[in-house]
Amino acid sequence: MTKPLVVITGASSGIGEAAARKFSQEGYPLLLLARRLERMESLGLPNSLCRQVDVTDRIAFRAALEEAEEQYGPTDCLVNNAGILRLGRMDTQDPQEWQLMFDINVQGLLNGIHLVLAGMRRRKSGTLINISSVAGRKTFVNHAGYCGTKFAVHAISEGIREEVADDNVRVVTIAPGIVETEILDHTTSDEIRQEYKDWKKEIGGGIRSEDTAEAIWYAYQQPQNVCIREVVLAPTRQQ
Ligand SMILES: NC(=O)C1=CN([C@@H]2O[C@H](COP(=O)(O)OP(=O)(O)OC[C@H]3O[C@@H](n4cnc5c(N)ncnc54)[C@H](OP(=O)(O)O)[C@@H]3O)[C@@H](O)[C@H]2O)C=CC1
Ligand SMILES: O=CCS(=O)(=O)O
């Protein structure tokens, strides 16, 4: 095995799954993490360890990472992708929904970074790829909580980049607009889900997970001294 370990969170569907397929095609050994183990195993990717890990569970996250590093060597790239979208109005939304978004989209992302960053700094090499959103750059109605999590992802990426640039560690933010995935299914309000679907239809649909995986790959495959700091990509007709 000559290529180094790539860790992808939220690899059981959508963008994470597409990224897993892409990195696997390129010959990288993988640690794939999500709660739906069977979905990751069904990808049947070679040299990939699939583990049922909730990214908010630091102990389980660490155990899986140690197991993978034992097998494949140190983590060269972490694609911090696990995330949820629970659209809602702040006056009516169940607080548990935005709490869960912050736990997964922000704390889960920080958990991953914390586990791999010291090693990357020591080795003077490594790449963190944080999946944010266009909703981390501009606001949208019904997105207040979600935008809060994704603005946080942008801020965390920028801050950490300043901390680790001198150690030759890259921090990349990928910020997609609407991507055709399962993400909308978890929004509990039928009305808001329908509004979002109507919006999507109006603009001719979202881009594909594979388009986002290509952007992730583009950033990663640059030489280590080139850091693509941010990629923002969205359906052309999305505002
Ligand atoms: N689709 C879109 O329009 C856009 C999505 N994004 C971002 O892309 C990322 C991926 O979303 P997308 O592919 O669209 O959506 P999906 O719902 O298809 O995928 C989300 C992934 O995250 C995993 N996940 C969710 N919660 C946890 C958790 N607690 N621990 C571990 N894994 C978890 C899910 O796996 P499981 O349920 O098995 O745990 C799944 O693999 C998210 O961060 C999202 O915010 C950004 C911009 C646009
Ligand atoms: O991140 C989700 C896509 S959008 O609704 O913000 O465009």
Image (cartoon, grey):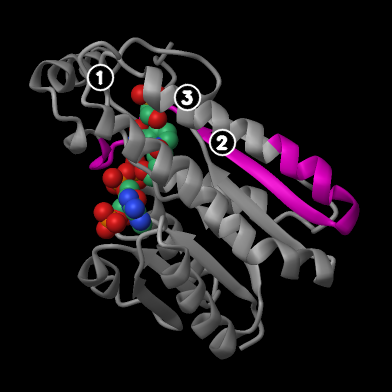
Whether residue 228 is visible to the viewer of this picture, yes or no, is: no
Report the amino acid beneath label 3: Gly
Mark pair 2, 3: CA separation = 9 Å
Of mark 2 and mark 3, the one earlier in the sequence is: 3
The answer to whether mark 1 and mark 3 are in CB contact below 8 A is: no
Start and end of the magenta stretch? 158-183
State the SS at label 1: loop
Q: Which mark is residue 111?
A: none
Examine the rendered structure and indicate whether residue 200 appears above or below residue 225.
Answer: above
State the residue position of label 1: 88
State the residue position of label 2: 153
In the rendered view, does 62 fall on the left or right side of 167?
left
Residue 70 vs residue 22, the one in the foreground: 70
In the rendered view, does 232 fall on the left or right side of 99?
right
Residue 122: give x, y in percent of width and height.
82, 70
In the picture, residue 116 is in which quadrant? bottom right
State the SS at label 3: helix
In the picture, residue 192 is in which quadrant? top left
Judged from this view, the residue extending furthest toward the front is 95
Quarter the C terminus occupies: top left
In the picture, residue 215 is in which quadrant? top right
